[in-house]
Amino acid sequence: MLSCGIAIACVIQQARAAESAQTYPTKPIRIIVPFAPGGPNDMLARLLGQKLTDAWGRQVITDNRPGGGTVIASDLAARATPDGYTLLMVSTSHAVNPTLIKKLPYDTARDFAPVIRLTASPNVLVVNPTVPAHSVRELITLAKARPGEINYASGGTGSATHLAGALLCILGGVNMTHIPYKGAVPATVDLIGGAVAAMFGTIQPTLPYLKAGRLRAIAVSSARRSAVLPDVPTVGETLPGFEAASWYGIFTAAKTPRDVIAKLNRESARILETPELREYLLREGAEPVGGTPEDFEKYFASEMAKWGKVVREAGIKPE
């Protein structure tokens, strides 16, 4: 009798899940962005949100919750009702924090469900023109000759740009000093001014300074060369195994009905393939990814393992 009751409950639960997916969405959707307005993650969230609004006729609101190394926004999303109406824009930082921050208010592996990986994009390793290095090999030689004296900037401790620099130091066998900033803009300003020697920067905002000769590009961080900078080699051409692409994706709260996640995934994947969004991403030096929630789950797990190892080997501590 008990097993019969359990079976009936499962059937009812499955029926409700199917019904929720068929009617979803019936109210506004919120995308929580862990960064201030104006950045690449914010812009991507707004573009995706507008396209979802157009497709479903329900408003998609971008909710910027910066601070805490993305922990504030992530905690808010983890505590949300698991119904698909609260989404979280995630990036490399979300995969790094479980190792970097010892006491998170949520369990990264347990409290979130992956929806889709949206984009992947390389960063570009740039130096101040006064630095006597025109290649990764020359930068490594310079750093070995002056251990600890060559510094590199990043947009913050644990950021993708910081980890790319840390991985360069590990694979290159060098000791360079990390200088964290509160964002890429002040880091770039100090790099141009000569206060720091190098940094991994986002391609599109860096391009004007490359064209003006105020910065010099020596490598990109992806596994293959960028279509935006086709003549710039990859770091991996000098240091085999190096890859440090930035990426963005969407998570939602764990226990969100699978059919709702599948519907979000399908519509987001379709939007990524629209000419308007593809052209925007390519202009920004990014590539649309897409794939299934399971694809994203597998990729995210590999990123957690990879960057967790880098954090431990480099001895990175939170600010």
Image: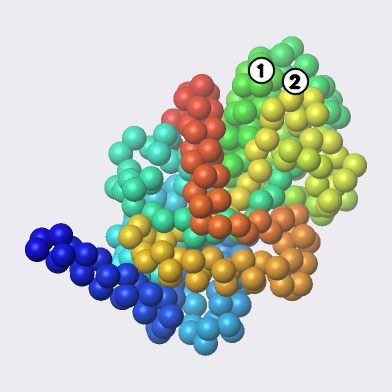
Q: Is residue 310 above or below residue 245?
A: above
Q: Is residue 127 visible?
A: no
What amino acid is found at the position of numbered circle 2 in the picture? Ile
Q: Residues within 10 Å of mark 1 (few under 14, many from 20)?
A: many
Q: CA distance from mark 2 to mark 1?
A: 7 Å
Residue 160, picture quadrant: top right
Is 169 on the left-hand or right-hand side of 106? Answer: right
Q: Residue furthest bottom?
A: 57
Could you tell me which quadrant the C terminus lies in?
Answer: top left
Q: Position of residue 209 (x, y in %)?
A: 81, 50
Residue that label 2 marks:
140
Describe the element under mark 2 as helix, strand or loop: helix
Q: Position of residue 265 (x, y in %)?
A: 54, 65
- Identified at 42% across, 76% down, the residue is 21
Q: Residues within 10 Å of mark 2 (few under 14, many from 20)?
A: many
Is 184 on the left-hand or right-hand side of 77? Answer: right
Describe the element under mark 1 as helix, strand or loop: loop
Q: Position of residue 15 (x, y in %)?
A: 32, 75
**Of callouts 2 and 1, which one flags the residue occurring earlier in the amino acid sequence?**
2
Asked whether disc 2 touches disc 1, contact meaning CB atoms under 8 Å apart, the reply is yes
What amino acid is found at the position of numbered circle 1 in the picture? Val
Q: Position of residue 184 (x, y in %)?
A: 62, 48
Residue that label 1 marks:
174
- Identified at 66% across, 67% down, the residue is 272
- Identified at 86% across, 40% down, the residue is 232
- Identified at 82% across, 22% down, the residue is 138
